[in-house]
Amino acid sequence: MRLVCLFFLVLLANGARADLTIEITQGVDNPTVIAVVPFGWGGGALAENVSNIIAQDLQRSGQFRPIDQNDMLAFPHRQAEVFYRDWRALGTEYLLLGDMEMRNGRYQLTFEVYDVLAQKKVLRQSVDAGKGQLRDLAHYASDKVYELITGIRGAFSTKMVYVEALGGNKLYRLMLSDVDGARPRLLLESRQPLMSPSWSPDGREIVYVSFETGRPAIFRQEVATAKRVQLTNFKGLNSAPVWSPDGKKLALVLSKDGNPEVYTLDLATGSFTRVTRHYAIDTEPNWTADGKGIVFTSDRGGRPQIYKVTLASGHTERLTFEGDYNARPRVSPDGKTLVIVHRSNGVFHIATQDLATGDMRVLTETNLDESPSIAPNGAMLMYATKHQGKGILAAVSLDAGVKFRLPSKAGDVREPSWSPYF
Amino acid sequence: MNYVTTTKQYAISFLHSDSFMPVMASVLLHAFILIIVGWGWESSLVTPRKVMPNYVEAKLVALKPTAPKKAAPKKIKKSVKKVDLAAQRHEQERLKQLQVKKQRQIAQKKKATEALKVKQLADKKAKALAVEKAHQLQEEQNRLAEQQILVEQQQQQAFADALAEEELLLQAELDAVAAQSFSGNIRNKVQSKWSRPPSARNGMKCLLKIQLIPTGEIIDVSVIKGSGNSAFDRSAEQAVKKAERFDLSGMESRIFEKYFRQFNLEFNPQDLRQ
């Protein structure tokens, strides 16, 4: 009876007042329209066009559509010069203004972001950089704008390493560059194959496989100083090293006991621990986000599939069931998504699998896509693919909304590895 | 169990809200109307049974007094005829007897007339009494009829009230249907303008308050309850601002005032990642 009374009251309450509420459950996810106005600068010609770099960064993220400078009606540098109506007429949602000056031998950039529709300033920040660091200045501003508008930390200031093969596999280079492919720097050159570069979680070192000794061996190398140490020299396979999230261990593959098995290496003590025990091939390990488990590829079921082993208990479970080939697993930074190489109809794609639901989604449609590496913000991933018979790098957003190819290099490019935040 | 607690919570939060007073007032008003209607129906079933028998009885009473009045004069005539059959033995005797008889006759006639007079008087009295009784009955009848009319009027009033109430509810229902189609248009327009940031996830909720003028132009947008993700909330606000105005053509001003001068938009994506 009381319930009925309450129900009656609720009905009356709804009838008496309560504003109408319309629920919005869908959207279009169009890229945000942003106008990056050429920055103010009183000096001579600069080595880099900072506002252009920012516009390109934002465009490549897929989340933004920068307005063409030729369409802009004015180039304001401060708030007093902003006429919102003009920008709104262009469909602009956000406006980025900047002013640069030289101070104490350093470039100083002050940038401001305006919400055109709300007609208010939403960000103002200053940053400075030395000569030769104009790109860093631009990427920094891109990160801030990206984070403000998307709610996700930007990763434009991060780096990547990749392997370049020149002259028909006669020369191998381990390269470091910005994630937009700019400012490539040589880390190591070898006449023997270089493979599987991977970053330490603090971004100061990399590990990789080099055949320079005549057989595969694992090395670690400081990025800044090029100081390097050989970690393994076992008979057979020494491959696929990856750093643990806490930076204390490596997971790697050794075949010293007969067939490829996953091991961990304690970097402080130098001791190896065998993780998998199976007569089938176990390879391509990667740590789970919490560092308590390792995912790896194994053909123990007859076909390559992804498995996960919990280190404390040794308990192993199979994660992938869709298709007859799933390999090279990578776990997203939030630990919720598995990125894999998935073969369907004889074509290799990059796919994601939701770890909670098991739902698989194919992100790329080109053939021979391999070696996915996820950005530290989990929004994009880089992978290697073939374009016109040549190995190139491409990127795709984790929701498959954006894809782009990185500028083509001289040789074959493969095995990209996206750095952590610095 | 859950339902009970949530309902209770709803009720409690509702008690604290500022809509409590008007709602209580409307509850009491509804309760009062319900009682009136309920009482009116019940009495209308009982009263006719009491009134109808009284009406029939009254007619019977009015006929009774006329029956004895006609019977009395016939008896008197018969006794007068009997005197004509006396013998002729002695003339004197006969005369005497005749005289006596005449005297008797006269006495009898006198008696008869007197009796008649008395009877007539009684009749008159009875008649008057009957008339008065009838009159009283008539009055009683009138009174009852009046009472019945009053009750009927009350019933009719209650019925009319209930009808008006029902009409109001019907109107509200029609208004709600009309409002729904406009709501759909508004939803479609906002959805077509809403570009979610990549950090948006299913389950995020942002409630905005929108104020319109009758031309459909948006004059104010404010966040009532944010999602905790400022990029998400800003995208919702921008979606509304991009819409600029909603098409309200053909909307009755009653519906505009009731639903659209001020309303809420809840942004609650269902088509994104968890």
Image (spheres, coloured by chain):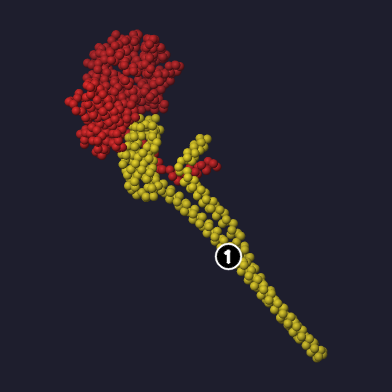
Chain colours: A red, B yellow
**B183 relative to A363, above or below:** below
Disc 1 chain ID: B
Image quadrant holding the C terminus of chain A, namely top left
Evaluate whether residue A24 shows in this view. Answer: no
Residue B121 in the image: state x and y as whole percent: 68, 76
Which quadrant would residue A69 be assigned to in this image?
top left
Expressed as whole percent of the image width and height from the top left, the position of residue B239 reads 33, 37
B174 left or right of A134 in image: right
**Residue A4 at x, y percent in the picture:** 52, 42
Give residue B44's quadrant in the image.
bottom right
Q: Quadrant of the N terminus of chain A?
A: top right
Q: How many marks?
A: 1
Secondary-structure class at tag 1: helix
Image height check: is A262 above or below B114?
above
Location of residue A130 with respect to A190 vertically, above or below: below
**Residue under the point 26% across and 31% down:** A96
> Is disc 1 surrounded by few (<14), some (14 to 19) or many (20+) residues within 10 Å?
few
Question: Quick one: B174 or A21, which is closer to the camera?
Answer: A21
Decide if residue A238 is in sight here: yes
Q: Residue furthest left?
A: A44
Task: Write the residue at 39% across / 13% down.
Answer: A264
Give the residue displayed 39% in from the left and 37% down from the top. Answer: B224
Residue name at image x 60 percent, y 65 percent: B140
Residue holding disc 1: B142
Amino acid at dot 1: Asn
Query: Could you tell me residue A214's position as x and y percent?
Result: 29, 9
The residue lying toward the viewer, choosing from B14 and B130, is: B14
Extreme-front residue of the structure: A104
> Residue B30 versus residue B195: which sits nearer the camera?
B30
